[in-house]
Amino acid sequence: MSTLSLRLPDSLHETARALAREEHISVNQLISTAVAEKISALMTETYLAKRAATGSRKEFRDIMSRVPDVPADPHDAK
């Protein structure tokens, strides 16, 4: 594990302290989790963009044309 010196505006630091207290975790754990969530979101966005770039609208339309045209299930129609 490594150490990171981080400068935060006072208001953000106070909010982080309050949230950490509410969650019964340390500010360190709150920030570690927040960074992990952000990294995950960015990596997912990159992954999906790469996957989308390999897609084909023609193949999509061909596959969708094989889906039967039936009414939606009543639970899904809302």
Image (cartoon, rainbow, N blue to C red):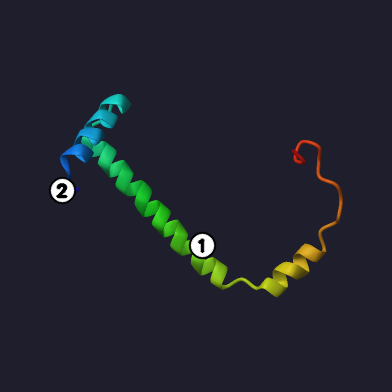
**In what element is the residue under mark 2?**
loop
Q: Is residue 36 left or right of residue 66?
A: left
Q: Which mark is residue 6?
A: 2
Q: Quadrant of residue 72?
A: top right
Q: At 28% across and 37% down in the image, what residue appears?
A: 30
Q: Which mark is residue 48?
A: 1
Is 70 situated above or below 22?
below
Indicate the position of residue 31 as horizontal and vertical percent values. Answer: 26, 42
Q: Amino acid at mark 2?
A: Leu
Q: Amino acid at mark 1?
A: Leu
Q: Quadrant of residue 53?
A: bottom right
Q: At 20% across and 38% down in the image, what residue appears?
A: 11
Indicate the position of residue 9 as horizontal and vertical percent values. Answer: 17, 44
Between the residue at mark 1 and the residue at mark 2, the CA separation in whole angstroms equals 31 Å
Q: Is residue 61 left or right of residue 71?
A: left
Report if the CB atoms under discs 1 and 2 are less than 8 Å apart.
no
Q: Earlier in the sequence, mark 1 or mark 2?
A: 2
**In what element is the residue under mark 1?**
helix
Is 18 situated above or below 61?
above
Instruction: Please state, as top left, top right, bottom left or bottom right, where the C terminus lies in the image.
Output: top right
Q: At 85% across and 56% down in the image, what residue appears?
A: 68
Q: Quadrant of residue 76?
A: top right
